[in-house]
């Protein structure tokens, strides 16, 4: 009797070095109760030192393993065709002097970028003209505009990035998070194409 098995591969799975990857780790499975436990414990891959930090598991490999294990299995796949297994290696902790150096570079770099932008668009001159138009008095330091503008600039950055330190203001993703997500998707597609041996094939020149 034909057994219908539904497989949905996960996009990304985190694994430890030397860990055994089972089918239940990389896919969602819907199958008859008589075989579901056996499928979940199906060994798909053994992480080794040769895998480095990225392993691509193709759905065709999964179908082949299931067909070897269960005769007359009708495997229906849904969703992505590959799963990226990322091997989590031990990372060195960042030293405090290095962290402080990076923090200073980012702080002063962003400050210089903001100041150069304001100088390019003559922000001070614009504020002086606005002050003169409203009050009729010339002032080289219109604090009534500059102080609220500086405070508003900081609040605007907080609203833009949707974070106050590590606390999120609301559930809506920030533009930076969206860009990071798009970058991760492009990176995953690149890895799938270049790391998956089954995605490319060179034919003979004959």
Image: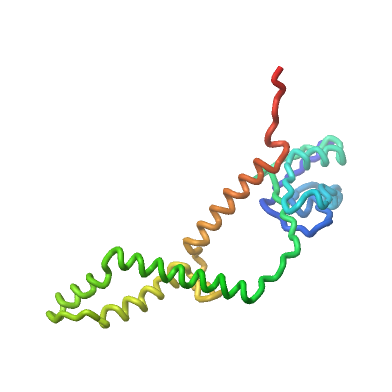
Residue furthest left as drawn:
136
Left or right: 168, with 204 as reference point: left
Q: Is residue 20 above or below residue 152?
A: above
In this view of the protein, which residue sits in the foreground, 23 or 117? Answer: 117
**Colour scheme in the image?**
rainbow
Q: Is residue 36 visible?
A: no
Residue 103: percent from left, percent from top: 54, 73
Name which residue lies at 68% across and 53% down: 12
The number of discs equals: 0
In this view of the protein, which residue sits in the foreground, 34 or 98? Answer: 98
Q: Is residue 67 above or below residue 174?
A: above
Left or right: 113, with 126 as reference point: right
Q: What is the quadrant of the C terminus in the image?
A: top right
Q: What is the quadrant of the N terminus in the image?
A: top right
Name which residue lies at 46% across and 72% down: 108
Residue 160: percent from left, percent from top: 43, 67
Name which residue lies at 28% across and 64% down: 121
Left or right: 28, with 146 as reference point: right
Residue 196: percent from left, percent from top: 71, 41
Residue 37: percent from left, percent from top: 85, 52
Residue furthest top as drawn:
206
Q: Is residue 168 visible?
A: yes
In this view of the protein, which residue sits in the foreground, 117 or 55? Answer: 117
Q: Is residue 3 above or below residue 108?
A: above
Left or right: 127, with 136 as reference point: right
């Amino acid at each position: 009797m034909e057994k219908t098995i539904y497989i949905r591969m996960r996009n990304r799975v985190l694994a430890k070095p030397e860990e055994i990857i089972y089918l239940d780790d990389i896919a969602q499975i819907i199958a008859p109760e008589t075989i579901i436990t056996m499928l979940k414990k199906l060994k798909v891959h053994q992480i080794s030192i040769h895998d480095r930090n990225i392993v691509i598991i193709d759905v065709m490999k999964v179908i082949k393993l299931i067909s070897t294990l269960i005769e007359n299995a009708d495997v229906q796949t849904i969703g992505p065709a590959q799963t990226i297994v990322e091997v989590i290696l031990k990372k060195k902790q960042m030293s405090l002097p290095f962290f402080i150096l990076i923090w200073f570079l980012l702080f002063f770099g962003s400050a210089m970028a903001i100041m150069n932008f304001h100088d390019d668009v003559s922000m001070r001159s614009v504020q002086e003209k606005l002050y003169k138009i409203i009050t009729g008095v010339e002032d080289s330091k219109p604090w009534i505009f500059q102080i609220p503008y500086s405070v508003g600039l900081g609040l605007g950055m907080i609203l833009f990035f949707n974070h106050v330190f590590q606390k999120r203001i609301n559930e809506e993703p920030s533009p930076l998070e969206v860009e990071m997500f798009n970058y991760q998707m492009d990176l995953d597609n690149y890895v799938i194409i270049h790391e998956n041996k089954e995605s490319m094939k060179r034919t003979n020149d004959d």
